[in-house]
Every structure is written in C-alpha cells, then in structure tokens.
Image: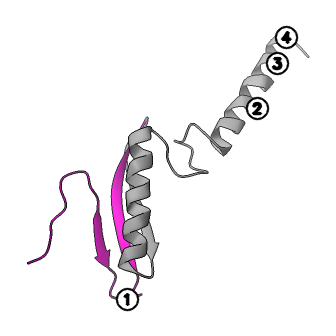
Amino acid sequence: MTKRRGHGEGSITRRTRSGLHMARYRVETPAGPKRKTIYGKTRKEVDAALAQALADRLQGAGRKGHPEVQGGQAQARAAGRRAGLRRAALGR
C-alpha cells in the first residue's frame, strides 16, 4: 500500500516519457492560485526540493525571478519603477 499525502502537501509522480520525477504544488498569488512544478532525476531529490518549496510557501516566499515574488529581482524592479515615477512627478 502506498502512502498518501495530505491536502496542500503537493504530489510526486514519475514521468513515463522522460523518466524524471515530478512534484507539483500550489502557491497563492495576488492574481490567484498558481501551480508550480519541480523536476529531478531521483524521487529523493524531488522530495527534498518539494519540502523546501513548501517551507518557503509558508513563509510567503516564492521562486526567484517570478513576478508574484516580493523579493529578489521583482522587488528590485518595483523599487526602480517607484523611483522613476517619483522623478516623473517632480519633472526631472
């Protein structure tokens, strides 16, 4: 009998075409829920990455470079846009 994961814990399967293991989980964003996918060669590797992603999700972080993330590159871009808007409002 296989073990089952609870609600909100993601899922891990093996892709038949590529032979890679795949984990899927959901992240709440301002635009609504998004489904994220993690790939890896071994189930153990994917399970560790999924555990880290779920821990990050609880802390409100996401993957670097995604627009829904308020940190990393997205935060730097937002700060640059705010500075540009301030300069435009002051007529500089």
Determine whether 49 is above or below 76 in the image.
below
Helix, strand, or loop for circle 4?
helix
Q: Nearer the viewer, mark 4 or mark 2?
A: 2
Q: Nearer the viewer, mark 3 or mark 1?
A: 1
Task: Using a 10 Å C-alpha cutoff, classify the residue at mark 1 as few (fewer than 14 neighbours), some (14 to 19) or many (20 or more).
Answer: few
Callout 4 amino acid: Leu
The tag on residue 88 is 3
The tag on residue 90 is 4
Helix, strand, or loop for circle 2?
helix
The tag on residue 17 is 1
Quadrant assignment for the C terminus: top right
Outermost residue, top side: 90
Reading the chain from its start, which is encountered first: label 2 or label 3? 2
Label pair 3/4, CB-CB below 8 angstroms: yes
Q: Return the residue at label 2.
A: 80
Callout 2 amino acid: Gly
Could you say where residue 86 lies in the image, as x and y percent from the top left?
78, 17
Callout 3 amino acid: Ala
Magenta segment boundaries in residue numbering: 1-29
Could you say where residue 44 lies in the image, as x and y percent from the top left?
38, 75
Could you say where residue 38 lies in the image, as x and y percent from the top left?
43, 66
Callout 1 amino acid: Arg
Reading the chain from its start, which is encountered first: label 4 or label 2? 2
Determine whether 90 is above or below 75 in the image.
above
